[in-house]
Amino acid sequence: MSASQIVVKNLCKTYRVPEREAGVGAALKSLVHRVYRDVEAVRDVSFEIARGEFVGFIGPNGAGKTTTLKVLSGLLHPTSGEVRVLGFTPWARQHDYLRRISMVLGNKSQMLWDIPPLDSFDVLGDIYRVPPTEFKSTLDELVALLEMEDLLTKPVRNFSLGERMKCELVAGLLHRPDVLFLDEPTLGLDVSMQARLRRFFAEYNRRSGVTVILTSHYMADVTALCPRVILIHHGQLLYDGALHGLAEKLAPFKLIRLALSGTNGQSDLPPEADVVEQENGHLTLRVPRATTPTITAQLLNTLPVVDLSVEDPPIEAVIDRIYQEGTV
Amino acid sequence: MMQEARGKKWDSRITLPQVNFRGGLALIRKTWLSWVQHRSFFFLLAFGWMIPPLIYLFVWSTAAGGGTVGGFSRGQFVAYYLVLIVVNQLTYSQTNWTVGDVIRYGGMNMQLLRPLSPVFDALSSEVAGKVVYILFIVPVTAVLALWLRPELHVTLRNGLAFIPALALAWALRFFWGYWLALLAFWATRADALLALQDALIFLLAGQVAPTALLPGVLRQAAVWLPFRYMVGFPVEVLTGQLNATGILTGFAFQLGWLAVALALFSVMWRAGVKRYSAVGG
């Protein structure tokens, strides 16, 4: 209990949004009489996160991920519920709290465009009161990890999206936060830059012991980095646990990929196996998780198998099913 | 339930200024570095602000001709308006125009996440701006002065009183505009009120005419409303239009209105952030 750095209990956040129909008449009416609608962005969400954990926060657009992150970082105060991060109430926004957290947003920048990043970093060092020697060593370490020595003295306006993201990360980590909120940090980046940043996040988490909550729509980010995932949908917590557990729980089937020699023996397939794909002697079958071993043995006995592999369905497919159906 | 109550208690603490001078100074430095990159843009802005007072300088000095209008000779009008150009430039808070955008487009999130009050962001562009404007306005006014030959006799008393009058005028104009700009927390086009403020300053702060020359009702309005104390008052002090009583009364009005502006700023800020963190940025 006391080991948890982030404690969220029964968190609810309801937005009150003005509502009106399109058109001039409705606009005039809304001047006199405003109609509001309550939108429950987060409903009764509870979880705890221990020091040094790397947790993936997943859910479709509008699920309540960003709202939850904004509550945790102090930008929003909840409608009800209890939240403690590092022992602080986030929305009091005490400087002692803000100095120990960091929020990096993939679509917002805290760099000034017209001056080199080094100048922006210096200012952040002062704002966060980082002692000069520590500032130097942290900066050197981050710059080396992100391989960005050559960027430090050029104006930010000339940077690519990936280069700018590197700067955002340095800016967000200069004060060595204990808790790091990463909201879509790889948004819009190319594949190799995403991979590079993933390596950085993993390495930085290992070295510094920082607690990280990551939201991303790229499942590759989540599978590479987060041993634990929290799945939110329609503002509710649907799953909290290991990533592979999510696949097991959600996808009660496995995929068997076969390469056959000669004719395909589709007539000999067991009845539980559904054919997902069939092409040039390659066959993909979907079989119930529990019967996978027996079916595999049966296939090896009855078919001219050249190659066989058993896989979990791709995580994207699993997630897509939950997003569509809204339940686990 | 208990947490609810605790949340409420914290809310009242949210806006207590937690002063961070090192950070504030650093921010000023950074903003300035960034602005110096755009000198020419700010010079153009400054040039634009100079035009209306310059027009009235010519109107009134022409009207005075060889004689006087309302006790002002041609040279005195020139002096009055040249000082006004400088004072107007140094007290103009262009930052207030951007506060609304920062709130609307989510820039406030980044500012609220830092252990530094967002008012420092506005103050830093103020200071950075003034330094850039001085680079423009001092040489330009000097050239105008050589050409137009103002009649200005600065006494020690007026010179000394001018400095705090100018500083208070800036503070009043800044915080008055800032609290208006904070209405952007509630309304999307709060900057219409800033345009209204500019119009009232134009009319009542000594730009159209020195306050002393305004007709009865307008002069009364100018004396009692805050706008004269944002621009006109320091100009009147330096150009020797006020006696000791006038100067002291002026300071009293300036301080009174500054207190009102600060109180409104503080209330608006507190309520605005509370609303912002309730509805989301």
Image (spheres, coloured by chain):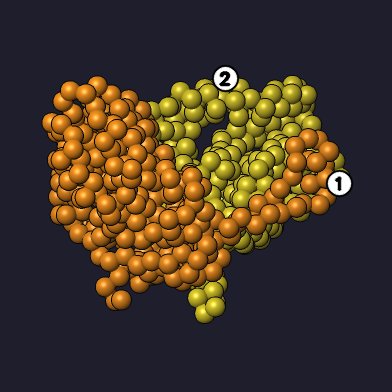
Chain colours: A orange, B yellow
Q: Residue at x 75, y 37 (%)?
A: A22
Q: Where A242 falls versus B7 (above or below)?
A: above
Q: Compare residues B107 and B266 and report the one nearer the observer.
A: B107
x, y percentage for residue B212? 77, 42
Q: Which residue is mark 2?
A: B147
Q: In the image as oriented, which residue stretches furthest toward the top?
A: B147
Residue at 20% in and 44% down: A298
Q: Quadrant of residue A312?
A: top left
Res B128 → quadrant = top left
Q: How many marks?
A: 2
| Chain at numbered mark 2 | B
Q: Which residue is mark 1?
A: B217
- Provide the chain ID for the residue under circle 1: B
Q: Amino acid at mark 1?
A: Val
Mark seen at residue A76:
none
Q: Residue at x 33, y 45 (%)?
A: A272
Under mark 2, the amino acid is Trp
Specify whether residue B18 is in view. Answer: no
Q: Secondary structure at mark 1?
A: helix
Crowd rating for badge 1 (residues with CA inside 10 Å; few <14, some 14–19, many 20+): few
The residue at the point 15 percent across, 33 percent down is A305
Position of residue B238 in the picture relative to residue A211 (left or right)? right
